[in-house]
Amino acid sequence: MSKKNRPLNIEELKTSCQNCSLSDMCLPHGMDREELERLDSIVVRHRPMQPGQHLFRPGDASHALFAVRSGALKSYCITEDGEEQVLGFALPGELAGMDGLGGNSYASASVVLETSSICEMPYDRLQSLCVDLPSLHRQLMGVLAREITADQHMLMLLGKRSAEERLASFLLSLSTRYRTRGLSATEFNLPMSRQDIGNYLGLAIETVSRLFAQFQERKLLKVNRRQVLILDLDQLRSMVESCASRAAAGR
């Protein structure tokens, strides 16, 4: 039976790109119904993945781009001395596997942090579709540009800011990303551990724990394990903006 004539499947309707609440952040952004149907035809939707499962590891043959539908991922690489270096975190509506586009293997790893639903888009079919659909190609280029900007921001974060400014900037980034998804900008769960946060920000885990305690004492936020409630968003912004001003003045 053809896809067009088969009976309506409610589960497929719920999970299609057309009906996904994250479509304005993921690759389908700006695509019309016919284009979305063509994208839907190449998407592989996995069963929920559990914490600790890998989508890919460094050196694995690159084969697909992955979109987070729910949950969270951590990307990392292994340094020359065998240590893990956290490169970033993917939240719902964000992508993993971009580093595989330029070669035959992935340079990094992507691991599930909490129970996650993942959409897989095979590179070969995605690239062929980009040739036919300029809107999809533009969106993919936009995602690549955001990846480059995020890397540049991270370099500035590690090179110019104090420990407390790094943590404040990280929390503000999460706040903005959750707000974009229609969720609370001031109350959210941290899917990553304190150790992962420290690794990402270039801080010792003891420093991260101490800073969270200091932020609570200053009534900037409340923390209950991984649950964060930001009490003074303006003050966090002020900390980050003052650093940016100092950096600009020092050029």
Image: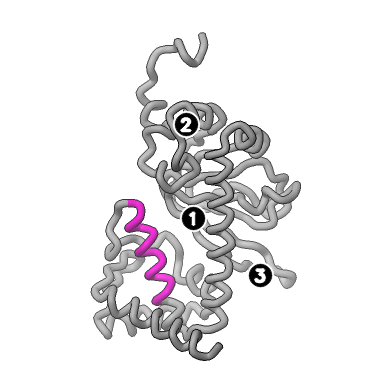
Specify the segment rendered in magenta.
Answer: 168-181
Do the numbered discs 3 and 1 sit on residues whose CB atoms are within 8 Å? no
- Asked if the residues shown at circle 2 and circle 1 are in contact, with their CB atoms under 8 angstroms apart, the answer is no
User: For this view, does 142 lie left or right of residue 242?
Assistant: right
Give SS at disc 1. strand
Examine the structure image and report whether residue 174 is included in the region drawn in magenta.
Answer: yes
Image spot of residue 159 (x, y percent): 57, 82
Q: Earlier in the sequence, mark 2 or mark 1?
A: 2
Circle 2 sits in a helix, a strand or a loop, which is it?
helix
Kind of residue indicated by mark 1: Ala
CA–CA distance in space, label 2 to label 1 = 23 Å
**Residue 66, label in figure:** none
Numbered badge on residue 36: 2
Kindly identify the amino acid type of the residue bearing the numbered disc 3: Glu
Residue 83, disc: 3
Q: Which element carries disc 3, helix, strand or loop?
A: loop
Residue 33 vs residue 115, the one in the foreground: 33
Q: Residue at x 68, y 64 (%)?
A: 78
Q: Which mark is residue 90?
A: 1
Dominant SS of magenta comes to: helix
